[in-house]
Amino acid sequence: MIGVVPNQHITDMIVSGQIIGTPPVDGAQIQPASLDLRLGTVAYRVRASFLAGHGAKVADRLEEFEMHRVDLTNGAVLEKGCVYVVPLMESLALPQGTSAAANAKSSTGRLDLLTRTITDGGTEFDRIAPGYTGPLYAEICPRSFSVLVRPGMRLNQIRFSTGAATLDDAALRALHADSPLVDGEAVIDDGLGFSVDLRLPDTTLVGYRAKPHTGVIDLDKIGHYDPAQYWEEVHSDNGQIILDPGAFYILVSREAVTIPPEYAAEMAPYLAMVGEFRVHYAGFFDPGFGHASAGGAGSRGVLEVRCHEAPFVLEHGQVVGRLVYEKMIDVPTQLYGSGIASNYQGQGLKLSKHFSAPR
């Protein structure tokens, strides 16, 4: 079978020992097409980001780059601008032919909390080779806000697949013709194009920009923080904004997206030809996201934007990324937004779940 592994098959992988949890995996970690990964009890502050490389173990590289260790048992602050490596509670013993990809969870990305998975022998972030057996680690670099973390927190997630499940453009056009994937014209070119919305109805508010000097965010506190203490509103009355170098923005896509139950999707992190800024996505879109069968009616994609060296004019409707669709092995028994704790079904412009509604 070729495709992305759904929740009921992830359960089978846990039972068969392909996914090992210490302590055992909690059923709440299992999402429609992915598994949430849990932080362990220690964070290693390292001098620089690194990959293990062929034939090397992350533990051995930690001896080379470690500066000091942070005990997370009772909670600890990971400071803005620092790089940490945290062993995860999950490890893998994948069969040959089964590979995996990891990505930050939605709320993690919206906090500009760079979180990537690394493995023994790994030569890429967030990509786990077919048949991988060994531990998993999270590399964490808070970019905009210092955060308070504890063991068991779930900052990233992993998706398993067998074979080449990605839809090519012809298959994507056929799917869109049968079950519209966006409201309006679909721009299909090596995936489904995403553009930015800088003309939101009945308001000049088009996004938020992270303030440079803020307090710590406790990742366990939901709906707790006043957005005004952490974010500046971004307004536009002419469909354009100027991105400031080094600043982090939350914007929203012009398209309302649908993921049919038989498919999953992943956002490509950025378009290389754009040049002056990076659009980073918490990249997994689960089956049922924005779909009527799961209580949705199309959901916007939240854009996490960081400008590079030069100020850059971003204009309404500019294509900034693409969504790659993949076929599921089976339809998940649980869809996004349908009876599970899905925070962003039917979303528009929205900050992470840690913030109260803007006043």
Image: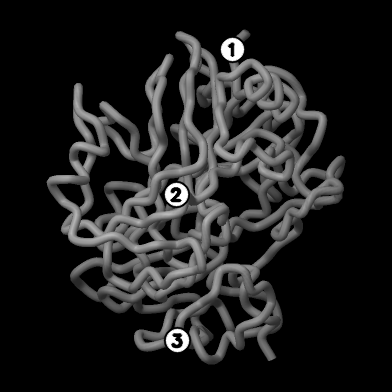
Picture disc at residue 2 = 1
| Mark closest to the chain's N terminus, 2 or 3 | 3
What is the secondary structure assignment of the residue under circle 2? strand
Quarter of the C terminus within the rendering: bottom right
- Label 1 or label 2, whichever lies nearer to me, is 1
Callout 3 amino acid = Gly
**Quarter residue 106 falls in:** bottom right
Task: Estimate the spatial distance between the alpha carbons at disc 1 and disc 3, rounded to whole Å.
Answer: 46 Å
Asked if residue 259 shows in the view, the reply is no
What is the secondary structure assignment of the residue under circle 1? loop
Callout 1 amino acid = Ile
- In the rendered image, residue 1, in percent from the top left (x then y), is placed at 62, 8
Seen in the picture, residue 83 relative to 359 is either above or below; the reply is: above
Residue that carries the numbered disc 3 in the rendered image = 215
At a point 68% along the width and 81% down the height, the residue shown is 356
At a point 74% along the width and 54% down the height, the residue shown is 342
Seen in the picture, residue 78 relative to 37 is either above or below; the reply is: below
Residue that carries the numbered disc 2 in the rendered image = 321
Crowd around label 2: few <14 · some 14–19 · many ≥20 (10 Å) = many
Asked whether the beta carbons under mark 1 and mark 3 sit within 8 Å of each other, the answer is no
167 or 222: nearer the eye?
222
Task: Estimate the spatial distance between the alpha carbons at disc 2 and disc 3, rounded to whole Å.
Answer: 31 Å
